[in-house]
Amino acid sequence: MNSLEDALRQFMASNPELPDGEEPTVTGKQPARRPADRLQVVIERKGRGGKTATIVSGFTSLDDDGIAELARRLKTRLGTGGSSRGGEILIQGERRREIVELLRAEGFRIS
């Protein structure tokens, strides 16, 4: 026997409440499944004093708090500033490629 089998036997012995044939479920933070949001990621320069911004829009499944949390994660991962308001996320700079990769990793579809 290997150590994985031993650990599994020990787990099953210490959890007799699990019915035979039923898989144990992992409790804890699991990634949320995203509905079929089709997000748009565009670059804007107008009205920003010549500065470039990347705008993410098209959220239908997230409320304002969810969008704000996603914006916080994007800003942290990219090491840049930004904001979220009105159902959109604004990230400072031209970061379209990186944002698309991160959003796809989160389970979103990009149009």
Image (cartoon, rainbow, N blue to C red):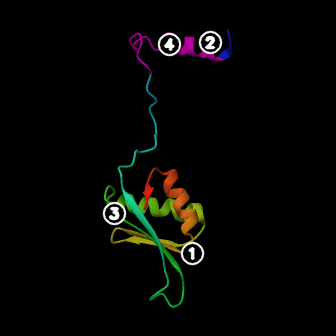
- Is there a contact, CB below 8 Å, between mark 4 and mark 1? no
The x and y percentages for residue 21 are 42, 12
Q: Residue at x 61, y 13 (%)?
A: 5
How far apart, in angstroms, are the residues tagged by discs 2 and 1? 52 Å
Which residue extends farthest bottom?
A: 49
Q: Which mark is residue 12?
A: 4
Q: Residues within 10 Å of mark 3 (few under 14, many from 20)?
A: some
Pointer 2 or 1: first along the chain: 2
- Is there a contact, CB below 8 Å, between mark 1 and mark 3? no
Give the residue type at disc 2.
Asp
- Identify the residue under disc 2: 6
Q: Residue at x 45, y 50 (%)?
A: 107
- Identify the residue under disc 3: 64
Q: Secondary structure at mark 1?
A: loop
Q: Which numbered disc, 4 or 1, marks the residue closer to the eye? A: 1
Q: Is residue 51 magenta?
A: no
The answer to whether residue 28 is above or below residue 2 is below
Which residue extends farthest front?
A: 111
How far apart, in angstroms, are the residues tagged by discs 4 and 2? 10 Å
Q: Residues within 10 Å of mark 1 (few under 14, many from 20)?
A: some
How far apart, in angstroms, are the residues tagged by discs 4 and 3? 42 Å
- Relative placement, left or right, of 84 versus 102 is left
Pointer 1 or 3: first along the chain: 3
- Identify the residue under disc 1: 94
Q: Which residues are magenta?
A: 4-23
